[in-house]
C-alpha cells in the first residue's frame, strides 16, 4: 500500500482499515466545544491533499459544552445533540463513525479526559477511536492542518496559549479563567475597563472616555447602574462584548483604554513566550522557526489599534523565528484532522 506525504496531509491511495468503502465506518467527527458555542463537523475518510480544503459533509452548531460553566449533564447533552445533528445532516448513522475527536474547553486534566472517553464509549460502538483534547489543541491543528507542532494563542472571551514539540511534549499557559489571571482575554480587558469606569466615578482613578462610551453602549445613564447591570448577569461572554468599545476609545487617544490594551498585549505575549521557552520551540539560540497560530476575535485586525499585531511584534522581539499562521479552516475541522492524523499514525 503506497502512501506519500504532500505538504502536511497524508494522501491515501487505499482506505484506512474499516474505512471508506462498502458501507463501513467512513466518517470522522471533529468537535470544537467552546464557552459560547460548540461546533461539530463530519468529514468523510476520503483522499485529499494539502492543496484542497478538507472535505466536510455536514456541520452543526450548539451552545456551551464547557462542563466548568454549565455542569457535566448539560455539557454532555450539548455534545450528544450536536453530534446527532451533524450525523443527521450528513445522512449517516452512528454506525458510519470511525473516529471522534472532541476538543472541548475545560479539559485540563487526565481525569476530565477519562470522564468524557467513558461516556463516548456508551454512545458509539466498540471499534470507534476516540480522542479527547483541550479545545486549544484543535485550534492549533486548524492552523497546521492536523500536525501538532508549534504554539497556538487563543484570545476570545477567554484566552490560552498551548504548544507542542514534534516529539509530542506539550505545555500550556493561561486558560485558567478570569479569577486566576487571564488578563489578556476579552473578559479580562472588559472587566478592567468596567473597573476603570467605577474608579473614575469614585474619584479613585483618572477620568476616561470609557465612562461615556460604555454607558452609551449599554444604554445606561450613570456608572451607578453598572452595579445592577453586572449583578444581573455576570457571564464572561456578556462582559467580554465590551472589548470593541475599549479599542475605539484607545484609537482616539484615551490613555486609560490604551493602557488596558497595552497590558493585555503584554499578558498575551507572555503566555506564548512561557510556552515557547518551556518547550524550547525557538531552539538553543532563540532563533528557530516555529508556527504561531492565532485564533479569536480579540486578535482580529482593527483600524488603528490592532491587538494581534502588537502581540506578534512583542513575541518576535524575543523569538525572531515566530511564523504567524491565521488558520484557513475552523477549529472543528482541526479536530477532525487531528483524528485523521491519529488514525494514520495508528495504521503505521
Ligand atoms: N474588532 C474586535 N476587536 C477586538 N475584540 C473584538 C472585536 N470584535 C469582537 N471582539 C471581542 O472578541 C471576543 C469574542 O471572541 P470570539 O468570538 O473569538 O470568542 P468566543 O468564541 O466567544 O470565546 P472563547 O474562544 O473564549 O470560547 C469578545 O471579547 C469580543 O468583544
Image (cartoon, grey):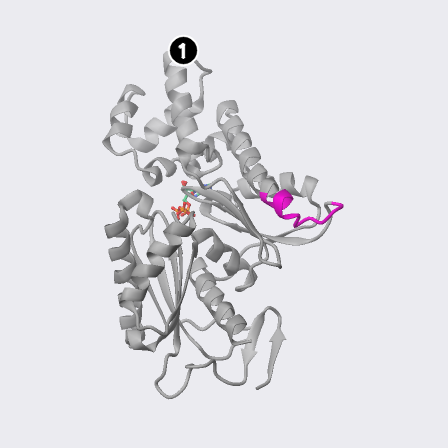
The image shows residue 112 at horizontal and vertical percentages of: 37, 51
Ligand 1 has an atom within 8 Å of the beta carbon of the residue at disc 1: no
Residue 151 visible to the viewer: no
In the picture, measured across the screen, residue 169 lies left or right of residue 42, that is: right
Vertical order, 265 against 10 (above or below): above
Which quadrant holds the C terminus? bottom right
Q: In this rendering, would 164 be left or right of 123?
A: right
Q: Residue at x 37, y 56 (%)?
A: 114
Residue drawn at 29 percent across, 20 percent down: 222
Q: Residue furthest bottom?
A: 22
Q: Secondary structure at mark 1?
A: loop
Q: Give the residue pinned by disc 1.
A: 203
- Residue 339: x, y in percent? 46, 67
The range drawn in magenta is: 275-285
Which quadrant is the N terminus positioned in? Answer: bottom right
**What is the quadrant of residue 245 in the picture?**
top left
Amino acid at each position: 500500500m503506497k502512501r506519500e506525504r504532500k505538504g502536511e496531509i497524508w494522501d491515501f491511495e487505499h482506505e484506512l482499515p474499516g474505512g471508506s468503502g462498502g458501507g463501513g465506518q467512513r466518517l470522522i467527527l471533529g468537535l470544537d466545544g467552546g464557552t459560547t458555542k460548540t461546533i461539530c463537523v463530519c468529514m468523510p475518510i476520503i483522499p485529499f491533499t494539502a492543496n484542497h480544503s478538507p472535505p466536510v459533509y455536514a456541520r452543526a452548531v450548539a451552545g456551551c459544552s464547557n462542563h466548568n460553566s454549565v455542569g457535566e449533564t448539560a455539557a454532555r447533552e450539548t455534545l450528544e445533540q450536536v453530534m446527532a445533528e451533524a450525523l443527521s445532516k450528513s445522512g449517516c448513522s452512528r454506525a458510519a463513525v470511525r473516529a471522534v475527536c472532541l476538543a472541548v474547553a475545560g479539559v485540563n486534566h487526565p481525569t476530565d479526559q477519562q470522564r468524557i472517553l467513558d461516556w463516548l464509549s456508551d454512545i458509539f460502538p466498540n471499534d470507534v477511536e476516540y480522542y479527547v483534547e483541550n479545545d486549544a489543541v484543535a485550534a492549533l491543528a486548524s492552523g497546521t492542518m492536523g500536525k501538532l507542532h508549534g504554539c497556538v494563542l487563543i484570545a476570545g472571551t477567554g484566552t490560552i496559549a498551548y504548544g507542542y514539540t514534534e516529539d509530542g511534549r506539550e505545555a500550556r499557559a493561561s486558560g485558567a479563567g478570569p479569577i486566576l489571571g487571564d488578563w489578556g482575554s476579552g473578559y479580562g480587558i472588559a472587566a478592567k475597563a468596567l473597573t476603570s469606569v467605577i474608579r473614575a466615578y469614585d474619584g479613585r482613578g483618572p477620568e476616561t472616555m470609557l465612562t461615556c462610551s460604555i454607558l452609551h453602549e449599554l444604554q445606561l445613564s450613570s456608572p451607578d447602574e453598572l452595579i445592577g447591570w453586572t449583578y444581573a448577569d455576570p457571564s464572561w461572554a456578556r462582559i467580554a462584548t465590551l472589548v470593541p468599545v475599549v479599542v475605539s476609545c484607545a484609537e482616539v487617544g484615551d490613555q486609560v483604554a490604551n493602557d488596558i490594551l497595552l497590558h493585555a498585549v503584554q499578558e498575551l505575549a507572555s503566555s506564548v513566550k512561557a510556552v515557547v521557552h518551556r518547550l524550547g520551540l525557538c531552539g538553543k539560540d532563540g532563533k528557530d522557526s516555529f508556527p504561531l497560530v492565532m485564533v479569536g476575535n480579540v486578535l482580529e485586525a482593527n483600524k488603528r489599534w490592532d491587538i494581534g499585531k502588537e502581540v506578534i511584534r512583542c513575541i518576535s522581539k524575543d523569538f525572531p523565528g515566530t511564523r504567524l499562521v491565521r488558520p484557513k479552516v475552523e477549529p472543528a475541522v482541526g479536530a477532525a484532522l487531528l483524528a485523521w492524523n491519529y488514525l494514520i499514525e495508528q495504521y503505521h
